[in-house]
């Protein structure tokens, strides 16, 4: 019983380390703005996909992140700058949207939500430099374990925390449909502009952070 409580406590610590940095509540308004033109079922599908992608990416970084970044010579600072550029670009698109051709509007409305779910929702918003760095730090701590059983248990605990964190993000995004109905068309347009500006600020902060620590 004590062991079960200890394991639950470690998982809770992992969740506390990931969820505040991911902060799905800050991603929810952006998610609402980007999916306001789609049906309710498609919005929920997009939320599910984005959280699945988030969990998959964090699990990959847990198991192979250090090796991948060392193989390609990628530093955490470069990761921050790249993530900031992607977020800033999406912010500009939201703040200054192009005037699409009617055929382009139709294709946009019918596009596969998986492209939106992966970028920018899963990467770099939910699975960004902050959450990746936390997972990499946890992976480094687990890999330092000399006993094989402790190492396997450590990876399992962190992986469980990642899955629970992704589920929490899914609950937040999945319930955002009520906010869409409350805001209406004009409210969504105003929110999109505001979120676009905030995304530019967040992206700039990521770039400056990566540049200053480089």
Image (spheres, helix red, strand yellow):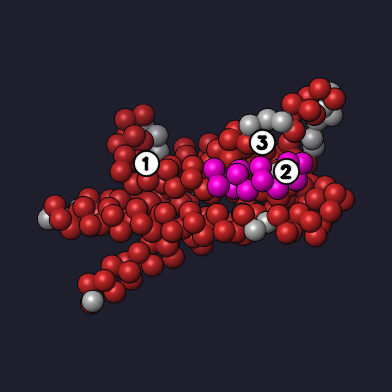
- Point 74% across, 26% down: residue: 107
Q: Which residue is mark 2?
A: 39
Q: Which residue is mark 1?
A: 60
| Mark found first going from the N terminus, 2 or 3 | 2
Rendered view: 161 above or below 208: below
Front residue of 172/214: it is: 172
Q: How far apart are labels 2 and 3 at the CA level?
A: 25 Å
Quadrant showing the C terminus: top left
Q: What secondary structure prevails in the magenta region?
A: helix
Quadrant showing the N terminus: bottom left
Q: Which residue is mark 3?
A: 89
- In this rendering, which labeled residue sits more in front, label 1 or label 3? 1
Q: Would you say residue 213 is visible in this rendering? A: no
| Mark found first going from the N terminus, 2 or 1 | 2
Q: Residues within 10 Å of mark 2 (few under 14, many from 20)?
A: few
Q: Residues within 10 Å of mark 3 (few under 14, many from 20)?
A: some
Q: Would you say residue 178 is visible in this rendering? A: yes
Side of 157 relative to 40 (left or right): left
Q: How far apart are labels 1 and 3 at the CA level?
A: 25 Å
Q: How far apart are labels 2 and 1 at the CA level?
A: 31 Å
- Point 20% across, 54% down: residue: 151
The span shown in magenta is 36-50
Front residue of 35/74: it is: 35
Q: Which SS class for mark 2?
A: loop
* x and y percentages locating residue 141 in the rendered image: 26, 55
Residue extending farthest to the bottom is 2
């Amino acid at each position: 019983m004590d062991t079960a409580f200890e394991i639950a406590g470690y998982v809770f610590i992992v969740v506390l380390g990931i969820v505040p940095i991911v902060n799905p509540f800050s991603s929810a308004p952006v998610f609402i703005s980007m999916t306001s033109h789609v049906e309710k079922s498609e919005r929920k599908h997009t939320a599910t996909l984005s959280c699945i992608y988030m969990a998959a990416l964090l699990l990959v970084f847990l198991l192979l992140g250090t090796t991948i970044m060392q193989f390609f010579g990628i530093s955490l600072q470069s990761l921050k700058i790249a993530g900031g550029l992607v977020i800033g670009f999406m912010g500009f698109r939201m703040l200054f949207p192009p005037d699409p051709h009617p055929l382009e509007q139709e294709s946009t409305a019918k596009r596969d939500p998986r492209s939106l779910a992966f970028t920018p929702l899963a990467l770099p918003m939910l699975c960004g430099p902050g959450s990746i760095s936390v997972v990499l730090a946890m992976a480094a701590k687990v890999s330092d374990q000399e006993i094989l059983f402790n190492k396997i248990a450590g990876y399992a605990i962190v992986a469980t925390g990642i899955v629970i964190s992704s589920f929490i993000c899914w609950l937040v995004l999945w319930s955002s449909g009520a906010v869409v109905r409350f805001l209406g068309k004009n409210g969504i347009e105003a929110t999109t502009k505001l979120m676009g500006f905030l995304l530019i600020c967040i992206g700039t902060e990521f770039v400056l952070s990566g540049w200053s620590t480089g």
